[in-house]
Amino acid sequence: MHSLYLLVIKLAMLYFDLGSPYGYLAAERVAAGLLGGPAEFEPILLGAIFRYRGRGSWAETDARDDNLVELAQRARRYGLAPFAWPDGWPGDGLAAMRAATWAARLGAGERFALAAYRRAFVDGTALTVGVLAEVADEVGLDGAALADAIADPEIKTALRAATDGAWDAGVSGVPTLRVGEALFYGDDRLETAAAAAG
């Protein structure tokens, strides 16, 4: 039973994009142990998912104000800091997600994601290349190498491949948690995913 449990946890994966406030909530809760074990943090580009599914973000619709209220309520309920919103959010997250891909390849995917999410949604700081370099330094990576890394064709290809692979696997948005072969889309599905993991 113990080995089976470890196998299931090993297969847990959180698909995320650093521009998603719901992704931030899910990342914090997964990192805090909601699943009872670790999950791999898999960066994907939400903008590409939007194009594939033929519709964009709720943040650019009439649902925006209601969702911002709901997000604030969830953060309070989870015991997290109040949201702060970066100027221009939602913006172009391509550089941030290439940086997250680079960090993941260096074994710092979860640490980088959490630190970047907190910069964006707790500090209210836009994730510019300079800020991303600071985040890299904060989690033990070489921030001076980040600008070249996110321009590397290999990193660009890796992010594109991860995004296409997620879409092909049935991921239609973030956060999505995969436990084994089952997908759970949305921060509000994490408890269901945790039950499946357990």
Image (cartoon, grey):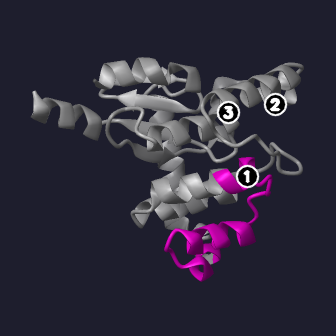
Amino acid type of the residue that numbered disc 2 sits on in the rendered structure: Ala
Looking at the rendered image, the disc whose residue lies closer to the viewer, 3 or 2, is 3
Q: Quadrant of residue 106?
A: bottom left
Sequence-first tag of 1 and 2:
2
- Where residue 84 sits in the image (x, y, percent)? 80, 45
Q: What amino acid is labelled 3 in the image?
A: Ala
Q: Distance between the residues labelled 3 and 2?
A: 17 Å
Q: Main structural element of the magenta stretch: helix, strand or loop?
A: helix
Image quadrant in which the N terminus is located: top left
The tag on residue 120 is 1
Q: In this view, does 2 lie to the left or right of 17?
A: left
- Determine if residue 182 is in view: yes
**Label 2: which residue?**
59
Would you place residue 67 above or below residue 90 in this image?
Answer: above
| Residue at the disc numbered 3 | 75
Which span of residues is magenta-colored?
118-147
Mark 3 or 1: the one toward you: 3
First reached walking from the N terminus: tag 3 or tag 2: 2
Tell me the CA gap for discs 1 and 2.
15 Å
Which amino acid type is marked by label 1?
Answer: Ala
Residue 25, which numbered label?
none
